[in-house]
Amino acid sequence: MMATNLDKNVKALQEVWRREENASCADCGKPDPHWASCSLGVFLCLDCANIHCNIPSINNVKSVRAECWEEGQVEFLVQHGNAKAKARYEAHVPVYYYRPVHTDCLVLREQWIRAKYERKEFMEPGKQSSYSNGLKDGILWKQGRDNRQYLPRRFLLSEREGCLKYFTKHDAKEPKIAIKIDTVNAMFQPEKTGHPNGLQITYLKDNKTRNIFLYHEDGKEIVDWFNAIRAVQFHYLKVAFPVACDKELKGRLTRNFLKEGYMEKTGPRQKESFKKRWFTLDHRRLMYFKDPLDAFAKGEVFVGSGENGYSVLEGLPDGTQGSFTWQYGITIVTPDRDYLFTCETEKDRQEWVAAFWHIIKQPMTPQEYAIEAYFKLKP
Ligand SMILES: [Zn+2]
């Protein structure tokens, strides 16, 4: 009798698990989830299941392969599943709100799960005031430009003024800097900053990229800042491009860098010794820094499209004279000159080459022609 019931349970569980809607993790979309939440009725990947385990109010996860599933638990999953959970817990996710994927950092994935199930932020409209009302004011820890020391600074994000400001003194009337929202990019950088809630903000000033590094001890607060920036950008774009659809605009909010890491580079004469630098590929801008946490780039290379004379080759030209330590060469060909780099490993080289091709293959937009022209004018 017992054995038959268990078999029936296992069979019913397998059936609901195999449903199309349950083929990817309810929270991050990773395919083939092997865990399930008995209280929420969703299927989860191992990493998301681990996050659920650490949140007392929703902690009720079990491996699909576990031996003992109670009939009531299986029945609950049969009645629910990922599609129903999405309709319930994601009913009012604002279009600009960042939905993390499996490769995103922990703070983004954890706060997404907490926002959905613990705080129930998206079950009804109007619960998103901490990032949706176009104004955010608060203290963030900001890394000093030169001494790398983090100090608390007041930040103010204002949709009305279209900018993000920060103040060096708490009671200061004038901001230290006011950054136009359409030049701001924000991305989480826990590894680079050495802080789990580390956020990098880049912006353009006089066509040059500047970096600031921030964090807040509270994961919710820093993710709220991130989404508040996206909200203000979204509303700004909505006014600037009234005919564009939401999906199109969403693609133009904060973006991750295509690739980052160390390479060696040589100078314009290609006879100079190669120097190790930290490289960041932000869409068509390849920037290099002495240190990953530098406030501004030592130099930038514009990477245009194939039709405009840009390409990337593996290896270095014959007779390259400068001395280099790393063996895996890359040559970026531009209409004006070739840029030579070396990577430490073949895997690194493949990743860089793939990242360069990704943008070279895309046609340039009118704005990108303007950026290219600026780079050509530069002394
Ligand atoms: Zn997941």
Image (tube, rainbow, N blue to C red):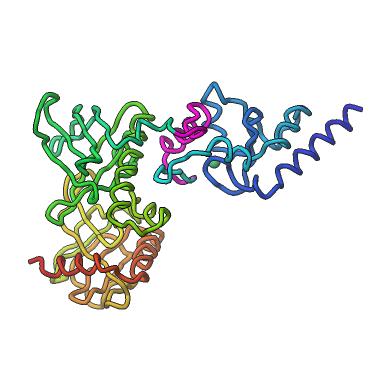
Q: Which residues are magenta?
A: 102-125
Q: Is residue 7 left or right of residue 278?
A: right
Horizontal relation, residue 268 to residue 68: left or right: left
Does residue 221 lie above or below 316 as drawn? Answer: above
Give yes or no for residue 362 being in the magenta stretch.
no
Give residue 212's position: percent from left, percent from top.
Answer: 21, 41
Spot the residue most to the top: 56
Q: Residue at x 33, y 56 (%)?
A: 242
Front position in the image: 157 or 261: 157
User: Would you say 319 lies left or right of 48 here?
Assistant: left
- The x and y percentages for residue 14 are 75, 42
107 is within the stretch colored magenta: yes
- Which of these two is toward me, 369 or 307? 369
Could you tell whether 180 is left or right of 246 in the image?
left
Task: Look at the picture and state if 153 lies above or below 248.
Answer: above
Quadrant where the N terminus is found in the figure: top right
Image spot of residue 238 (x, y percent): 32, 52
Q: Quadrant of residue 208?
A: bottom left
Instruction: Name the residue located 33 percent from the left edge and 39 percent from the top edge.
Output: 226
Residue drawn where x is 32% and y is 38% of the image: 228
Q: Quadrant of residue 194?
A: top left
Query: Where in the figure is residue 112, as x and y percent of width and height?
Result: 46, 36
Which quarter of the picture shows residue 308?
A: bottom left
Nearer-the-camera pick, 132 or 301: 132
| Quarter of the image with the C terminus in it | bottom left
For residue 137, above or below residue 340: above
What number of labels is visible? 0
Task: Specify the quarter for ligand 1.
Answer: top right
